[in-house]
Amino acid sequence: MSTIDKILVPFDFSEASINALEYTLSFAGPNRDIDILALYVSAMPITASEENGLKTDFAKVVAGFQRRVKNTPEFITTTGRVTESILSKRKEHNMDLIMMGTMGDKVTDEAITNTSRLVLEANCPVISVPYGCAIKEPKDIALVMGGEEIEDKEVLKTLLELARTFDSRVHVLTIYKESVYAEKSVVDSTEHLLEYYLEHFYVEHSFNKNQDVEQGILDYINDKNIDLLAIVPRNHAKMSTPSEGRLTKLLTLHSEIPVLTLD
């Protein structure tokens, strides 16, 4: 049974959200029984007439993609703050995955966008879809692992579901700064975990040295022609000291391919 049956797409008619919606339609495809819910968040209450107009415009956007899906995407509106509203509606409608577009910010490392904020606050899988990325199936997925063990093994189920859906190859990447032995001592102990949860889709584990962890990841993406980057944020860690989520934020801002945060 699929674990991804319902996808929430924050949608505000921006180029980034339109791109994310098309990516979601491609993800769902013509034969998968996936419900797509587009959410428009308004800072101020909107009238029934305005809402009807937004629904009409949304239908035109969907029709313009000329992509067949099994279930017609639904459009709803709500009023409130963006991140809080998205997380509230995700919980209310029991959505399995959020796909949110982003323009990113390659100029600075300190920018906070709605998408980068969402991936840090969400306690569910989120795929951030950068504007301009290729709309295609994720055939090669890279899972970034650090020197810590994965606390909640259940998060890997989403990654396995994606691999099963698209018959993807899952590459595991560890970037180390000094000695590879310290990293391998932890990773070797979880190798059976990766093989168990990722089944035959798990193809390799690479250890690359780079003082700049983010740059090492981005270089790997380009070298291996990776289609989707997966990362397990540690800002919600319970068994160890939570991180501030800096690497997750940076990858959301700078990656030119979609980033899946497994939470």
Image (cartoon, rainbow, N blue to C red):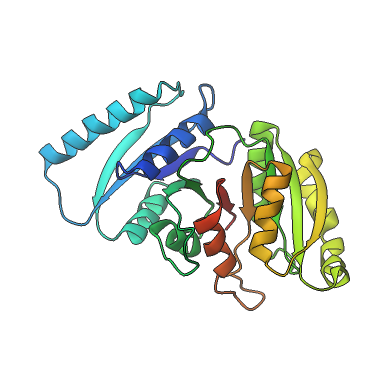
List x then y, in percent, for residue 213.
Answer: 68, 65
Q: Residue furthest bottom?
A: 241
Q: Residue at x 63, y 49 (%)?
A: 229
Q: Is residue 38 left or right of residue 117?
A: left
Q: Judge whether residue 153 can be spotted in this image.
A: no
Q: Residue furthest front?
A: 107
Q: Residue at x 49, y 32 (%)?
A: 34
Q: Quadrant of the N terminus?
A: top right
Number of numbered tags placed on the structure image: 0
Q: Is residue 184 left or right of residue 13?
A: right
Residue 128 sits above or below residue 186 on the image? above
Foreground residue, 219 or 153? 219
Foreground residue, 216 or 98? 216
Q: Is residue 253 left or right of residue 88?
A: right
Q: Judge whether residue 85 can be spotted in this image.
A: yes
List x then y, in percent, for residue 166.
Answer: 65, 32
Q: Is residue 122 left or right of residue 172?
A: left
List x then y, in percent, for residue 186.
Answer: 82, 68
Q: Quadrant of the C terminus?
A: bottom right
Residue 238 sits above or below residue 44 on the image? below
Q: Residue at x 55, y 48 (%)?
A: 256
- Give the quadrant of residue 43: bottom left
List x then y, in percent, for residue 67.
Answer: 44, 22
